[in-house]
Image: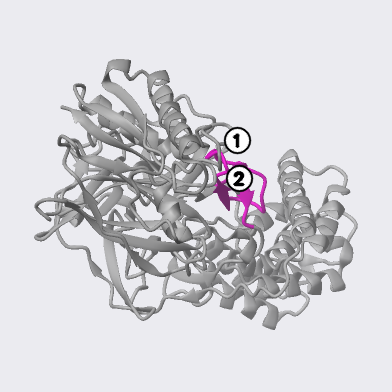
Amino acid sequence: MKKTIFLLAFALLSLHLNAQSYDADKIKPKALARYENAIQLLKDGLTREAVPVLLECINIDSNFLDAYLSLAGAFGELKQYQRSVNLYEKVQAKDAEYFKIYTLPYSINLAGLGRFEEALKAVNTFLSIPNISERGQKSAAYRKQSYQFAIEYAAKHPVTDYQFAPINLGDSVNGPRSEYYPSVTVTDSLLVFTRRTGDQREDFMQSTITNKKFGKAQLIDGDINLEPRKGAITVSQDGEWLLFAGDFSGQGLGWYDIYLSQYTPQGWSEPENLGPAINTEFWESSPSISPDKRVLYFSSNRPGGYGGRDLYMSFRQPNGKWGKAINMGPMINSAGDEFSPFIHADNQTLFYTSDGLPGYGNSDLFVLRKNEKGEWGKPENLGYPINTIENEGSLAVSADGLTAYYASDRSDSRGNLDLYSFQLRPNIRPNRTLYVKGKVTDAITQKGVPATVELTDNNNDLVLMRVQTDELGEYFITLPTGKDYTFTVNRKGYLFYSELYALSKKEADSVYKKDITLKPVKLNESFVFNNILFESNSYALPENGLAELSQLIQVLNDNPTLKVEISGHTDNIGNAKDNLTLSTNRAKSIVDYLISKGIHTERLSYKGYGDTKPVADNNTETGRAKNRRTSFTITGL
């Protein structure tokens, strides 16, 4: 951890230059006596208490430059950067030579105000002083590097019409102790966070959000708060899971482990240790769960990483168990500490904290984005003034991508760390999202059935979300706006469901309903492919239909005795004989693809029907489009 501004300034007291006009021996004795009291308070960490004593020293003797300098250091420690800068500049005006050694802490306070060009000039002045201690040189070099980063970042990312104005969440959420690790549900209806309630105790709290107003924070119900030693907490986007770090006596695999509690009609369940795939004998904390609850992100200091604490990820397997944790790699992790990941509701944007990547000093907030191939790109610093010369902690972002929540000890804090909200700059916002909810039912009984709902981005055929419905077949999914998707639903014993769902022009932050009916696997049951749309007069298999064929392959693998006929159909435009040939070739191209993927030939047949089996009126374009189709029919069980 870097030294604080005051302690750095205090350490420089012994480094005064010889050539000076200021004479400490001429200071009034009463001021010196009070100054000794102030220094003891500063050494004891009682910075606020030292401030009035130092002000008294200056009132007694206005030439007491050491009192000015100590007071400047104290204000810097309290993040009152402007008052600190004013005092340093007052000393500089009184005795520029005596002040010169303090250009390093002066530069830090300038940077605290975002005046990085001036800070760089000041630190260069400090580095020009002969015979600086090795410690002073290292500290100055570190600060110089961070100022240069800030200047270069501002040049590359000019900001206009943006006001950083964090809003304290108020007395309903914040109290006299520290609040941190905020997390919100996708509907922005529930805020959960951690509150320190004692020297060795942290409690998990919740606040209900109604019309953007926060209700009185209360302890989260259930067994989750029984143990005192807890830490980071996160709520799943659907509000059904709480994941958190805890050091539970006799229950963990190591120091801090990650636990899961699920919401039930009786309240939150007893915490469950996520087991050895996630937890080790070392420290695991700051979990974040993807909106489809398939991927867990967290931080750990286990051996084999790239620094102290690294980010890891684990995939939930089809049986519900977690796969072995995977390090997220050297582009994301550094030689320092990475922690507090937060995956946004778009499932494409990850925020996290690092003190090892280039930044403004101490720990900064960064954002990662997935590319078109679904791979994580390079981390991007969120920039000043979100990042400062101080330590930045965890960040959570609402589903609309506009509002961020974080912990800070700003001047209007109720005590230590408080929770704040602020508006994100447009260039660092995640994708805006919309919500799709519905129910999966049995076509015959009309009863809800548990199933897997998969959504594929039609632009690149990447699966963006894969969620499991509840026992009643109900599901709730968040999706990035501006895209069209294919909905695919699977359950063993049923034919899969697949349909194009055009959402690219739908409004953000809206809720759309999509109920889905599954047909049980039975003889002569048919299914029409919705996304296998051949080009005119072509039987080349279209790329955007492969996702549906993968689902058919899954059905065939799940039911190894099943036989199907692939059928091709056309509208009535053109020559009937040509249409018959075209439909036959289209059906055959699908069979050839299935065979290439390992399905035995004897289980497959194909037939073209041309325009002989219309399902809609061929006198309209809409009807003809429905007639130009391919399908499969179960011919054997």
* Percent of width and height locating residue 380: 63, 49
* Percent of width and height locating residue 20: 88, 61
- The residue lying toward the viewer, choosing from 577 and 567, is 577
- The residue lying toward the viewer, choosing from 559 and 316, is 559
* Percent of width and height locating residue 50: 55, 71
Among the 4 quarters of the image, the one containing residue 30: bottom right
Confirm whether residue 458 shows in the render: yes
Which dot marks residue 504? none
Badge 2 element: loop
> Relative to residue 259, is residue 158 drawn left or right?
right
The residue where tag 1 is placed is: 331
Magenta-colored span: 354-382
The residue where tag 2 is placed is: 379
Kind of residue sitting beneath label 2: Pro
The structure residue drawn at horizontal position 27% and vertical position 21%, both measured from the top left corner, is 603
Kind of residue sitting beneath label 1: Met
The structure residue drawn at horizontal position 37% and vertical position 37%, both measured from the top left corner, is 609
The structure residue drawn at horizontal position 56% and vertical position 43%, both measured from the top left corner, is 536
* Percent of width and height locating residue 126: 83, 52
The answer to if 200 sits in the magenta stretch is no
Give the class, few, some or many, for how many residues have Cα within 10 Å of label 2's Cα (few <14, many ≥20): some
- The residue lying toward the viewer, choosing from 496 and 632, is 632
The structure residue drawn at horizontal position 60% and vertical position 41%, both measured from the top left corner, is 377
Badge 1 element: loop
The answer to if 371 sits in the magenta stretch is yes
Confirm whether residue 387 shows in the render: no
Q: Is residue 569 above or below residue 108?
A: above
Question: Dominant secondary structure of the magenta stretch?
Answer: loop
Are the residues tagged 2 and 1 within 8 Å (C-beta)?
Answer: yes
